[in-house]
């Protein structure tokens, strides 16, 4: 079945341009168009639509109202905003009802890439009922505004350190946590870091973004409204330890800088799915959390799908992918318990340029296995298919030593 996309805009010229864009790209997509929100709702009610791409400012039913109605009536439809609106206060309400926001004018490759990514990520939530469950969850975090502003500045050809510092310092809770991370033993500063600028230079842009993203997500949830057995502090402490160790393991494995930083970001976000489940399906979360900790991964995944519709890894990966995070980060989150699920049968080996899939995935999986492993069996949580892999035999002693050094 070809992908079905509905474009909504009150400018006929814009709609014709979007149709030409899809046609010239040679894509086998079924494209529908609507000049207003009312017509779009009629089409959604009569046709099977995979993706809705809408403007915000239209006469009659506005784009905001259309997004809300689509979320209520057709939760499985992926909702993307294409707008010239740039007011931060206004956009926060849009972020809450959409999966992605793109600014006009939008390069064709960006629009097509975002739609393709959103649809491709559905492989993490199959069957369709699970995708609908994810789209219809009432308490999903939105991508933090501070992160978006920071990302835009860092993406410039000549990013300004002073602007980056001012963005971080304008969000005091984020700034405080940022300095805490920079001064932690994991990054071993030679002297205490007291200035944001020094921390930015010490950590690098990718780690800065990761910390700002993680803090911005946490700030959106009230701990008092989460299940009583949800240990927020414990969860994020675990995630930070996994992130730091994953970065160290990627370094040991010979990963390049981008791979090391991706490992850190994915490690920091790998258990975001537990927060999503706790906030949206508290009864299911309590049932899953009460299961034995040593339950085999396959059995735990089955338990999560039975009670919540998908695993915590799938929920997190889907959301991060829709936010536009790089594929290697999304995939490392999705497969952090099951790295061999990422295996290309034609290659016949495992993770990384050395072994078959991205090295960030391998690093996060190993770090997650090691970070709370018993001292007498540190590799117990490793995927059985990796235990005798040449890469494991080569580096396992260094991995274990790194884990002990970071987490004495």
Image (spheres, rainbow, N blue to C red):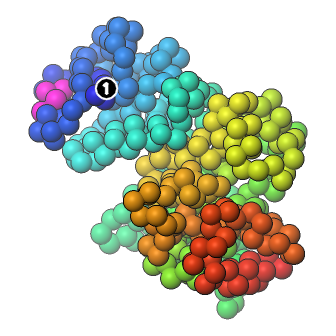
Camera-side residue of 345 and 7: 345
Camera-side residue of 273 and 375: 375
Q: Quadrant of residue 4?
A: top left
**Position of residue 91 measured from the top left corner of the image (x, y, whole percent):** 45, 37
Q: Quadrant of the N terminus?
A: top left
Q: Is residue 381 above or below residue 248?
A: above
Residue plotted at (74% across, 44% down): 300
Image check: 345 left or right of 40? right
Residue plotted at (32% across, 35% down): 82
Neighbourhood count class around disc 1 (C-alpha, 10 Å): few under 14, some 14–19, many 20 upward: few
Camera-side residue of 408 and 342: 342
From which residue to which does the magenta span run?
15-20
Does dot 1 land on a helix, a strand or a loop?
loop
Q: Is residue 2 above or below residue 92?
A: above
Residue plotted at (24% across, 16% down): 35
Residue named by callout 1: 1
**Position of residue 364 measured from the top left corner of the image (x, y, whole percent):** 61, 65
Q: Quadrant of the C terminus?
A: bottom right
Q: Is residue 111 above or below residue 14?
A: below
As for residue 314 lying within the magenta part, the answer is: no
Q: Is residue 399 above or below residue 206?
A: below
Q: Quadrant of residue 85?
A: top left
What type of secondary structure mainly makes up the magenta span? helix
Image check: 49 left or right of 365? left
Q: Is residue 189 visible?
A: yes
**Position of residue 221 measured from the top left corner of the image (x, y, whole percent):** 71, 41
**Position of residue 315 measured from the top left corner of the image (x, y, whole percent):** 60, 41
Q: Is residue 214 visible?
A: no
């Amino acid at each position: 079945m070809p992908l079905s996309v509905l474009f909504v805009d009150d400018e006929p010229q814009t709609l014709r341009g979007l149709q030409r864009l899809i046609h010239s790209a040679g894509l086998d997509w079924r494209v529908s168009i609507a000049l207003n929100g009312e017509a779009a709702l009629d089409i959604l009610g009569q046709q099977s639509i995979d993706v809705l791409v809408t403007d915000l400012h239209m006469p009659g039913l506005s784009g905001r109202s259309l997004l809300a109605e689509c979320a209520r009536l057709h939760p499985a439809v992926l909702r993307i905003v294409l707008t010239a609106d740039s007011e931060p206060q206004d956009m926060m309400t849009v972020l809450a009802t959409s999966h992605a926001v793109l600014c006009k004018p939008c390069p064709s490759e960006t629009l097509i890439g975002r739609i393709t990514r959103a649809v491709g990520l559905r492989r993490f939530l199959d069957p369709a009922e699970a995708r609908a469950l994810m789209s219809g969850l009432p308490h999903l975090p939105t991508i933090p505004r501070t992160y978006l502003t920071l990302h835009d500045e860092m993406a410039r050809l000549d990013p300004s350190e002073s602007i980056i510092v001012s963005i971080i310092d304008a969000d005091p809770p984020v700034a405080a946590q940022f300095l805490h991370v920079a001064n932690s033993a994991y990054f071993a500063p030679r002297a205490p870091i007291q200035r944001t600028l020094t921390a930015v230079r010490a950590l690098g842009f990718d780690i800065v973004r990761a910390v700002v993203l993680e803090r911005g997500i946490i700030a959106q949830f009230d701990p008092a409204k989460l299940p009583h057995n949800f240990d927020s502090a414990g969860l994020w402490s675990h995630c930070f330890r996994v992130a730091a160790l994953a970065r160290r393991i990627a370094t040991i494995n010979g990963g390049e800088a981008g791979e090391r930083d991706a490992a850190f970001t994915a490690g920091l976000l790998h258990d975001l799915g537990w927060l999503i489940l706790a906030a949206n399906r508290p009864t299911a979360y309590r049932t899953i959390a009460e299961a034995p900790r040593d339950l085999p991964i396959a059995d735990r995944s089955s338990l999560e799908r039975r009670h919540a519709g998908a695993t915590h890894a799938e929920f997190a990966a889907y959301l991060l992918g829709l936010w536009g995070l790089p594929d290697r980060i999304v995939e490392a989150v999705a497969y952090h318990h099951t790295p061999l699920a990422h295996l290309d049968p034609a290659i016949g080996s495992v993770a990384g340029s050395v072994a078959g899939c991205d090295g960030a995935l391998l690093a996060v999986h190993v770090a997650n296995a090691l970070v709370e492993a018993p001292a007498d069996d540190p590799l117990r949580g490793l995927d059985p298919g990796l235990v005798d892999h040449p890469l494991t035999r080569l580096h396992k002693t260094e991995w274990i030593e790194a884990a002990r050094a970071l987490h004495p």
